[in-house]
Image: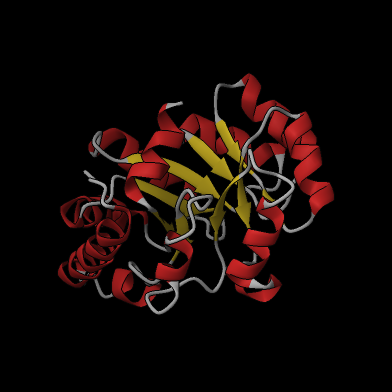
């Protein structure tokens, strides 16, 4: 699947909280310049829908998705704005089914074997492990991977420049999600050059571990 392959190639899913949709396009271009072509705009602010729409319209090289999607209304808004995937903090079977019906990739959050089993019944194999560090980090990902060998994980929550490498070294980790490469403070300050530098540093580390290529 194209979106899943983008996750794999990027290795990093920037988790973005944005208050001003006018910053979305320069942010997307800064991430691209650093080597990442996929972005998750969280539905934690009123600007999220327009930010996704701006990226979809003006930065076609970037693949936008919506994060913190917990309702049918948010799914509809994200889809209309041009989101190619949604990420949720938990597993809502009806929300997943609705996204699948719209041709949108759904990545629900899980932390337990029961949630993984429910996700498999929906035809899923990629899951957000959230909140990662609060639920045992890489040790728990490895433990869950033993009985659920088909699962691939995007650990998110407490993942940063100091611990991302330990996740990347485990092959069942498809990518990591994190806000450290584009923190809200730098977006608000419009310091996009620094965001590009941080992104490039993270991409270099990922490539050194996985030996892959990015954008």
Above or below: residue 192 compared with residue 51: below
Task: Give the x, y percent position of residue 139.
Answer: 63, 69
Residue at 74 percent across and 47 percent down: it is 147
Residue at 57 percent across and 50 percent down: it is 153
Q: With 113 as the anchor, is 131 left or right in this view?
A: left
- Does residue 92 appear anywhere in the picture? no
- Does residue 64 appear anywhere in the picture? yes
Q: With 37 as the anchor, is 20 left or right in this view?
A: right
- Residue 99 vs residue 131, the one in the foreground: 131
Quadrant location, the C terminus: top left
Residue at 46 percent across and 42 percent down: it is 65
Q: Quadrant of residue 195?
A: bottom left
Q: How many marks?
A: 0
Task: Give the x, y percent position of residue 168.
Answer: 42, 60
Task: Give the x, y percent position of residue 163.
Answer: 45, 75
Q: How is the image coloured?
A: secondary structure
Above or below: residue 18 compared with residue 145: below
């Amino acid at each position: 699947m194209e979106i899943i392959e983008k996750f794999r190639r990027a290795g990093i899913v920037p988790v973005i909280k944005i208050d001003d949709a006018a910053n979305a396009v320069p942010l997307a271009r800064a991430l691209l310049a650093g080597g990442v072509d996929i972005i998750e705009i969280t539905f934690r602010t009123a600007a999220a829908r327009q930010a996704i729409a701006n990226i979809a319209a003006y930065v076609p090289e970037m693949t936008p998705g919506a994060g913190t999607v917990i309702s049918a209304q948010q799914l509809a808004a994200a889809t209309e704005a041009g989101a190619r995937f949604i990420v949720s903090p938990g597993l809502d079977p009806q929300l997943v089914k609705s996204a699948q019906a719209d041709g949108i990739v759904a990545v629900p959050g899980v932390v337990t074997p029961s949630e993984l089993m429910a996700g498999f019944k929906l035809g899923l194999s990629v899951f957000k492990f959230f909140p990662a560090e609060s639920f045992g980090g890489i040790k728990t990902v490895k433990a869950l991977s033993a009985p659920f060998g088909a699962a691939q994980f995007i650990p998110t929550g407490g993942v940063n420049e100091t611990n991302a490498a330990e996740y990347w070294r485990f092959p069942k980790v498809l990518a990591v999600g994190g806000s450290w490469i584009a923190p809200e403070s730098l977006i608000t300050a419009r310091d996009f050059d620094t965001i590009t530098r941080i992104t490039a540093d993270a991409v270099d580390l990922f490539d050194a571990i996985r030996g892959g290529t990015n954008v």
